[in-house]
Image (cartoon, coloured by chain):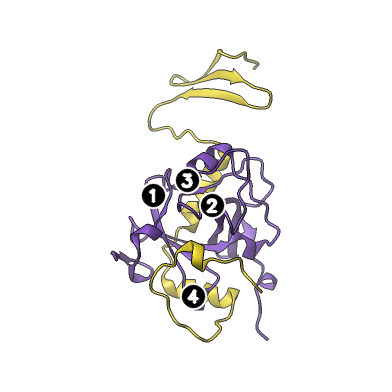
Chain colours: A purple, B yellow
Amino acid sequence: MPDFETTSFGRISYQPEWAIEFPSGLPGFEDRRRFAAVKFEESAPLVFLQSLEDPALCFITLPVLAVDPQYRLEVSGEDLGQLGLAPGKQPCIGTDVLCLTVIAIRESGPTANLLAPIVVNLRNLMAVQAVAPESEYSLQHVLLPEEAPVCS
Amino acid sequence: MSRRAGETILIGDDIEIVITHIGRSRVKVGIRAPRETLVIAREVKLVRDENLAAAVTTPPAALFNLVARLQPASGSGTVCRVPQPPHSSLQSPRR
């Protein structure tokens, strides 16, 4: 099992067949193609998308349904092609694809990018960041404290 | 300015925009620009800026602060050191 040194988590080991492949990278990181989904029990449901090419590159993500249980995924024909999915049919979150929203930590608090979720085909682990030009979802959806489960 | 398919718009000396195809609801344009000029759709630029802001250069402590704010630790605190296969580890969240 290969090891990879990361800035955020130290050394991680991963199974190569679990690596997530972005054929076109992500906007702003076009040359970063391979990532590992890192989860910690203590930080569930957060998923850290750690680049396997750049030790310092990591995205904090959440399953999109954890942020919006009613989230409607719309993947363009081009993106469906990149994922190796049939055109004309929207994939189902959870059974066909994993859908993650990228979290940004701002001074005003964390926000989630619901406009362009990361979509991973669960069958082949090919992934895209699905930019939906006509979507009404927010690029910076505020994760309100009230939305987080709170222990009394 | 109104253009037909095949016609061109010039911006300055070195940017050329050709209307290559006009469909029912979409227009295909070809853009010729210097290599150093970034040519992307507006929404991709927005997502790009958002990704650059989101890419973590934050030390893990700050990450786990966020975690504590989103969901107080359940107490187990065991670290899964190995990245989980998404198909087995990432279920829809249950509250």
- Do discs 3 and 1 belong to a common subunit? yes
Q: CA distance from mark 4 to mark 2?
A: 24 Å
Does residue B91 appear anywhere in the picture? yes
Q: Which residue is mark 3?
A: A27
Q: Chain of mark 2?
A: A
In which quadrant is the C terminus of chain A drawn?
A: bottom right
> In the rendering, at what x and y percent does residue A80 appear?
54, 42
Q: Earlier in the sequence, mark 3 or mark 2?
A: 3
Mark 3 or 1, nearer chain start: 3
Mark identifier at residue A43 = none
Q: Could you tell me how far apart the alpha carbons at marks 3 and 4 are, in whole angstroms?
A: 26 Å
Q: Nearer the viewer, residue B88 or A147?
A: B88
Say left or right for B47 vs A152.
Answer: left
Name the image quarter holding residue B26.
top right
In the picture of the structure, the residue carrying the numbered disc 2 is A119
Q: Which residue has dot 1 on it?
A: A33
Say whether mark 2 and mark 4 are on the same chain: no
Disc 3: host chain: A
Measured in 3D between alpha carbons, the distance from the residue under mark 3 to the one under mark 2, in whole angstroms, is 14 Å
Q: Amino acid at mark 4?
A: Phe
Q: Residues within 10 Å of mark 3 (few under 14, many from 20)?
A: many
